[in-house]
Image: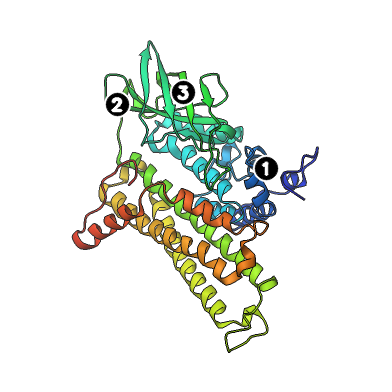
Amino acid sequence: MSFTTQTTVDPAVDRWQDAAPPQTSEQWIARAEQVADVLAADALERDRAGAAPEREVALLKAAGLVTLLGPTEHGGAGQDWPTAYRVIRAVARGDGSIGQLLGYHYLWAWAVRLVGTDDQIAAVEELYTRDDLLFGGAVNPRDSDLTIREEGDELVFSGRKSFSTGGVVSDLTVLEGVLAGTETHVFAIVPTAQDGIVFARDWDSLGQRLTESGSVEIRDVRVPWSAAAGFVDRVYQPLVYNTLNVPAIQLVFANFYLGIAQGALTRGSHYTRDTTRAWPYGGDDKEHATDEWYILEGYGRLQSALWADEALIDRVGDEIGALLHAPREELTERARGEVAVRIAAAKARIVEDGLEVASKIFELTGARATANSVGLDLYWRNLRTHSLHDPVAYKFREIGRHTLLGDVPEPTWYT
């Protein structure tokens, strides 16, 4: 069935209603692959329609993926970050936009662990896990920060952000701003459905069209001081662990890039097997396109690159997973920097290789594969759009400095 068909009962969303939840990492990844199959069936049609992905989010919730990292005592799966990364990748094979939404959700759901106090962590994780809530975030560091003023025991956030991925379909929003008259940054988690959060619904991009990454205005959103993440008696308690947010989300990027590229290769290979014709004027005529040496070589090169990327991405996923799940006080600046530079390498490689896959498949499928009805452009558009998030050249520079000088990148909003 079409995922966008309006029905009273939706088998795609309700298919797991009576099923036992997965118990192992492998079972959760298999569940994500089932979700990807549903999404892939009409990904192109939904991309062109551009509607807010309400039912796609319902699908993620019904499958149990939204609470994958949530504590088991509150109904979550209690899985780890290496599993979450593989789940993001699997979903992105079916729809890159929804893979991005899920990946950002995982990072924002973990944000309270990154910067919050023990009491804040317990409260937020119980809330979002128990009620199956999706996170969005109004935290774009290239914009001016939201301003925060104090009014008694409350903080009042105001301002505008150019990007707020997932905001329109989220239940909770992560806000970040600077306390007026200081250089103090404050994070807080608030309900999305309130008058002070106004989405412009102006996301109009080449790709990743269903991520709802448009702008948002924050109009006097009030938060109690007690909800300021990581503050005790209005004083922030810093840890090196706080800075894992950037390498963690950079690897989220790498995983949904890999998923998009894998989806492109799968879709292209299906088209080649089913539709592409052999070239009859080369002097070495073949009966089938799958016998053509240049097609076999082309798919071999692309698959080899993605296998190598997957191995590196999985390895650094295990490395940062160990840090994310270790006691927060134990993380050193050097350990953080070492994993950050390796994540930079993983991301840089999949950007280059993924774009090559998304472009090269047109040569391996043939001129007729450029038809809009085929939709192979979706993969290139999605990957090209988000891979411009921050310049890959700076990732290679970080890797070069580490290789030549032994340096590790300083924590910033992008490293």
Residue beneath the point at 65% across and 37% down: 54
Residue beneath the point at 29% across and 58% down: 399
Q: Is residue 202 above or below residue 407?
A: above
Q: CA distance from mark 2 to mark 1?
A: 39 Å
Residue beneath the point at 53% across and 53% down: 381
- Which residue lies under the disc numbered 3? 218
Q: Residues within 10 Å of mark 3 (few under 14, many from 20)?
A: many
**In the picture provided, is 225 more to the left or to the right than 28?**
left
Q: How far across and how far down the image is residue 150, in percent?
A: 36, 14
Q: How far across and how far down the image is residue 305, in percent?
A: 46, 69
Number of disc labels: 3
- Which residue lies under the disc numbered 2? 184
Q: Out of 96 and 50, give the one closest to the viewer.
A: 50
Does label 2 or label 1 sit earlier along the sequence? 1
Q: Is residue 43 above or below residue 213?
A: below
Q: Secondary structure at mark 3?
A: strand
Q: Secondary structure at mark 1?
A: helix
User: Is label 2 or label 1 in front?
Assistant: 2
Residue type at numbered disc 2 = Thr
Q: Residues within 10 Å of mark 1 (few under 14, many from 20)?
A: some
Mark yes or no: residue 307 visible.
yes
- Which residue lies under the disc numbered 1? 62
Residue type at numbered disc 3 = Ile
Q: CA distance from mark 1 to mark 3?
A: 30 Å
Q: Residue furthest bottom?
A: 283
Q: How far across and how far down the image is residue 76, in percent?
A: 58, 41
Q: CA distance from mark 2 to mark 3?
A: 19 Å
Based on the displayed image, in which of its 4 quarters is residue 68 positioned? top right
